[in-house]
Amino acid sequence: MIISSLIVAATLSVAAPQPNIVELAVSSDDLNTLVTAVKAAGLAETLSSEGPLTVFAPADSAFSQVKPETLQSLLSEPGTPTLKRILAHHVVAGELQASDIVNRDSVTTLAGTELPVSYVQGRVLIGDAAVTLADLDASNGVVHVIDRVLMPPPAAKPLYQLLVLTIERGVPLYNDGNRGACADVYRTALDAIVLSGGFGLSESDRSRLRTEIDEAASKDTDALRAWAYRDIIDRLASTSAASAPQSNSNISNTSENAILRFDDKNESRNWQIVLDGVMGGLSTGQVNVNDGSMTFSGETSLRNNGGFSSIRRDLEEGSLRGADALKMRVRGDGRTWIVGTRKSRLLGADSYWTRFPTEKDKWISVVVPVNEMERHFFGERASGSISPDEVRGIEFYMYDKNAGPFRLEVDQIDAVKINSVS
């Protein structure tokens, strides 16, 4: 009897096995839509594998922000490839606890995409999503619940992928002095594009391409031929990257809270340059938009009590509706910069500032809570605050009381919510 009791006690003391990621999601009351999506995409087996994996799991409330017709399309059979890519964009190889994530600038997903990481006011931001519940341990990894569905960038077209591969193989040959071999690699790829009907080029496009290839082939030296072929490749790559189709037309190329992107060179016309010359200073500044980013550059001078250079742009009313912070991806010069917001589209001298440091020639993400921005009037601190709904303009200042050249590159500005309720 005693032995039997001991056996029963020992049996009861054995802990239940830890659930895997899928089992953990199934047992949750807040991940029902994710479970449905995982099953529809055929990823249940992958997420139940040995791993380890880290999953950023959109809560049911996050999926409720997706248009119902879009979600229904994704869950249907024609939407499976797109759904797989979206879900893979939420999964990272390896086990990353929250304490590991905050020490990173970004993570690479199973979709081959990058998700920037930020840590603001005690909240972890993954892309544009806030982690609302962290470190849910599973037998094959860890789950972090997030407050929105993260949309990956569109997959590159096959033509673009071929051209990038061609350049990667041709450039080392050219740099090693094998100019003829480089030209041959470029010519072979271009001939393949002309002869193939699978890259989406019309007959007139291929005819024009044949003419350009023949003209490049007539150049006098291997170096000139290589550069002529490369010019054709660069133009094709630019066109194919810009026209990469969405895998689902109902899904936006960028997050729903994107404020500014810089794909249009004419965007530079929307920015007004304001220099210290209005007070007699000698600082300079200029704005250029190329290759998907905006560059603000120039030189600050302390002569004549100067020392600042700035640019500003109007924003549409409601640009920050539903958000409480600005998120920017920037590459700076190592100097400290100012980002500002304004309540009015008029020039004025009243704005709200936050300073942020940059690392020379390194891309970083900067998150700025709007209600913490400090009011400045003619550069002097003043009382007052601004709310996201009041924002009608954005500006950048170089105003660190130092003389010398400056450069800031910006490739995206988003409105994000960092204080969502858990």
Image (tube, grey):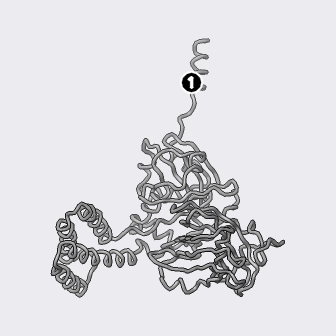
Can residue 148 be spotted in the picture? no
Question: Which sits in the foreground, 224 or 120?
Answer: 224
Q: Residue at x 70, y 61 (%)?
A: 419
Q: Residue furthest front?
A: 303
Q: Residue at x 59, y 50 (%)?
A: 102
Q: Residue at x 65, y 82 (%)?
A: 274
Position above or below: 223 against 280:
above
Quarter of the N terminus within the rendering? top right
Q: Amino acid at mark 1?
A: Thr
Question: Which sits in the foreground, 400 or 321?
Answer: 400
Give how far across and how far down residue 325 sits, in percent: 67, 67
Residue 217, quarter of picture: bottom left
Position above or below: 415 against 104:
below
Rate crowding at label 1 as few (under 14), some (14 to 19) or many (20 or more) other CA atoms within 10 Å: few
Position above or below: 56 against 137:
below
In the figure, is residue 249 to the left or right of 391?
left
Quarter of the C terminus within the rendering? bottom right
Residue 181, quarter of picture: bottom left
Give how far across and how far down residue 151 sits, in percent: 50, 66
Question: Which sits in the foreground, 368 or 19?
Answer: 368
Question: Which sits in the foreground, 412 or 297?
Answer: 297
For the image shown, how many numbered marks are present on the structure? 1
Position above or below: 279 against 373:
below
The residue wearing badge 1 is: 11
Give how far across and how far down residue 242 sits, in percent: 40, 77
Q: Residue at x 55, y 50 (%)?
A: 25
Q: Residue furthest right?
A: 383
Give how far across and how far down residue 74 sits, in percent: 46, 67
Residue 343, quarter of picture: bottom right
Can residue 141 be spotted in the picture? yes
Helix, strand or loop for disc 1: helix
